[in-house]
Image: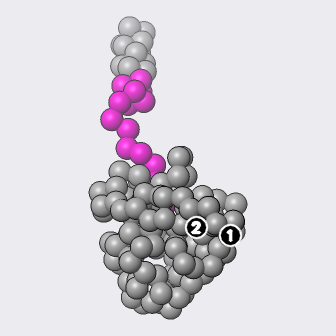
């Protein structure tokens, strides 16, 4: 019985230590077959981009370059259409060539979510709470 209690105690201690420290963050964005945490995205380098909405209000966002992200995920070729999917299922698509050519298009950090910031492009492409980017 003492051995059983010792094994259970060690198991509980191990579970608590695992839960308390050194956890790997869950991916917040899937690009193609690759999952990215916020740290992964920041590791690609960040930049700022301004977006002016239909009311003329301009907001500055910080995030990772869309073209750099696509390159890193291996999606810079092999398809024609880029699809952005939001957590609520909303989808918007754009030509992959346009995305790669856009120097100031970013996946922006917006509090606890990610959003597409694509200056000078349709408001339908400014997907809020984006969780997946794929190529068709």
Q: Can you tell which quarter of the image residue 19 is in? A: top left
- Please give the name of the residue rendered at 58% of the width and 67% of the height, measured from the top-left corner: 52
Question: With 83 as the anchor, is 14 left or right in this view?
Answer: left
Nearer to the camera, 51 or 65: 51
Question: With 40 as the anchor, is 114 left or right in this view?
Answer: right
Q: Quadrant location of the C terminus? A: bottom right
Q: Which residues are magenta?
A: 14-29
Residue 117 visible here: yes
Q: Which mark is residue 54?
A: 1
Nearer to the camera, 25 or 70: 70
- Please give the name of the residue rendered at 36% of the width and 62% of the height, measured from the top-left corner: 47
Examine the structure image and report whether residue 21 is included in the region drawn in magenta: yes
- Please give the name of the residue rendered at 52% of the width and 73% of the height, measured from the top-left corner: 118
x then y, percent, for residue 81:
54, 87
Q: Which residue is mark 2?
A: 52
Callout 2 environment at 10 Å: few (<14), some (14 to 19), or many (20+)? some
x then y, percent, for residue 22:
33, 35
Q: CA gap, disc 1 to disc 2?
A: 7 Å
Which residue of the protein is positioned furthest toward the front in this rendering? 56
Q: Which mark is residue 29?
A: none
* Dot 2: element: strand
x then y, percent, for residue 75:
40, 80
x then y, percent, for residue 9:
40, 15
- Please give the name of the residue rendered at 45% of the width and 73% of the height, measured from the top-left corner: 105
* Dot 1: element: loop
> Relative to 107, is 25 above or below?
above
Query: How many marks overall?
Result: 2
Callout 1 environment at 10 Å: few (<14), some (14 to 19), or many (20+)? few
Residue 85 visible here: no
């Amino acid at each position: 019985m003492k051995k059983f209690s010792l094994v259970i105690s060690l198991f509980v201690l191990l579970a608590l230590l695992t839960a308390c420290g050194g956890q790997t963050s869950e991916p917040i964005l899937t690009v193609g077959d690759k999952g990215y945490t916020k740290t992964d995205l920041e590791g690609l380098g960040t930049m700022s981009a301004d977006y002016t909405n239909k009311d003329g209000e301009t907001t500055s966002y910080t995030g990772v370059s869309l073209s750099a992200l696509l390159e890193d995920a291996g999606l810079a070729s092999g398809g024609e259409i880029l699809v952005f999917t939001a957590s609520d299922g909303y989808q918007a698509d754009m030509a992959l060539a346009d995305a790669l050519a856009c120097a100031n298009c970013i996946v922006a950090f917006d509090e606890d979510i990610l959003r597409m910031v694509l200056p000078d492009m349709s408001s339908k492409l400014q997907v809020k709470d984006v969780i997946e980017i794929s190529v068709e």
